[in-house]
Image: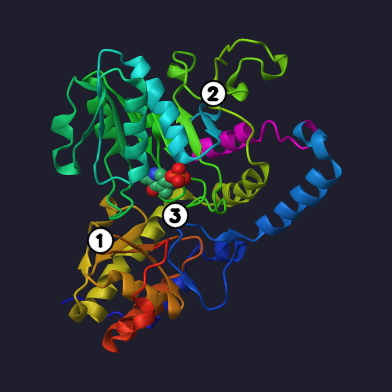
Amino acid sequence: MTNILDRGTFETLDHNDELAPFREKFYLPEGLIYMDGNSLGAMPRAAVERSADVVKREWGEDLITSWNKNGWFHLSKKLGARLAPLMGAEEDEVMVCDATGINLFKLLSVALQLRPEHKVILMEGSNFPTDNYMAQGLVQQLGQGHEVRFIEQDNLIENITDEVAVVCLTHVHYKTGRMHDMAAITEKAHAVGALALWDLCHSAGAVPVDLNQCEADFAVGCGYKYLNGGPGAPAFLYMAKRHHGKAQQPLSGWWSHAAPFAFEQDYRPSENIWQMMTGTQPILSLSTLECGIEIMEQADMEKVREKSVRLGDLFIELMEQECSDYGFKLASPKNGTQRGSQVSFHHPEGYAIIQALIAEGVVGDFRAPDIMRFGLTPLYLGYADIWDAVARLSKIMAGKVWQKAEYQNRSAVT
Ligand SMILES: *Cc1c(COP(=O)(O)O)cnc(C)c1O
């Protein structure tokens, strides 16, 4: 028989939590339990001062000289170098720039050029759609007989055949939080002569990643989720050094030129990671992302992972204890080692329930058709928060509060 959980259990865990001091580095509204850091990370307090400084001093006073004086031109490269250790990459293999989808497009194009005899891009149809749409857009644009082939996790390994040019997968699934075995899949891809591109949107800053250890070829990921970079923060891309200078990415803007300030008539690609750039980057957004990265650098990723798994396990256990009568069905792996940093449940009334929860100060989100997602961000979410969130949910379910008309209408963003 399992022990009955009570709030005291959670309070004790908070009391002994080595990561608890990180909570102060973030601003969150009083009383709010924020479980959506997998979609938009919380605001680092430092971002307020940093963005004001970039606007007032760097832009206002220093104007154009900031490209040199305040390091604007090299900011993408500098942030890439700072992010690299977080994902097991070398400093000169990562750039912070553009959006995830755009970076994916550039890298997929490189991958297809490196494997001209292979015509298949292998992906999961259930992946976050932008990755799949981007791949389909690229294939359409190339017109060289490539195919985007959708295979789900259960049949994945045996479908990595010698037709495949690149296996392009999201490491942690956006809906279920299920995590792929990056090392095993990359190894299988290489065994058939294919390359591996990993989307780390739900991994960077959430779970330990070692791209070089796995011999991954390419990766992309988001700056505004677990890296807490702010709304629309630039994404990152990784390209293993062995692929630098071997192919030309298609969005060949001046920042990817070997000598951008030579203003030559013809394109001549840079030989290093700069080749993956396109054009002028959003400096304000890069600046707030730097505040998020700075916090991540101070956190021990193994401890972050340990707490994240524990938060998830307790959340699942508590849902069984308090909410078993209300029709929730776990959508995430129960085994924490197979899960990223989120827990999801199926419920036919998921949308309305999430709206009612938000009104009660617990923020999660909803993904069609019936998934309620809860992000677990160990740097600003405590154990007692989990207790309180489930208590509020249980109250909403017992009182059927979600049935109110105001919780039924869907907004543009769910
Ligand atoms: C969040 C997310 C994206 C976001 O793409 P944008 O280009 O930033 O809009 C892409 N892929 C996955 C898997 C995501 O979870």
Instruction: Say which residue appears at 15% left-offset and 30% top-offset.
Output: 159
> Which of labels 3 and 2 is toward the front?
2
Label 2 and label 1: CA atoms lie apart by 40 Å
Ligand 1 under 8 Å from disc 1 Cβ: no
Instruction: Say which residue appears at 57% left-offset and 69% top-offset.
Output: 28
How far across and how far down the image is residue 29, in percent?
A: 57, 73
In this rendering, would 315 be left or right of 219?
left
Residue 381 vertical placement versus 226 (above, below): below
Residue annotated with mark 2: 273
How far across and how far down the image is residue 125, in percent?
A: 24, 42
Label 3 and label 1: CA atoms lie apart by 34 Å
Label 3 and label 2: CA atoms lie apart by 31 Å
Q: Earlier in the sequence, mark 2 or mark 1?
A: 2
Instruction: Say which residue appears at 44% left-offset and 15% top-offset.
Output: 247
| 83 in the magenta segment | yes
Colour theme:
rainbow
Residue 384 vertical placement versus 166 (above, below): below
Residue annotated with mark 1: 369
Q: How many marks?
A: 3
Residue annotated with mark 3: 303
Please state the extent of the stretch shown in magenta in the rendering: 68-86
Residue 339 vertical placement versus 325 (above, below): above
Q: Secondary structure at mark 1?
A: loop
How far across and how far down the image is residue 48, in percent?
A: 69, 59
Closer to us: 81 or 14: 81
Q: Earlier in the sequence, mark 3 or mark 1?
A: 3
> Label 2 crowding class (10 Å Cα cut-off): few <14, some 14-19, many 20+?
many
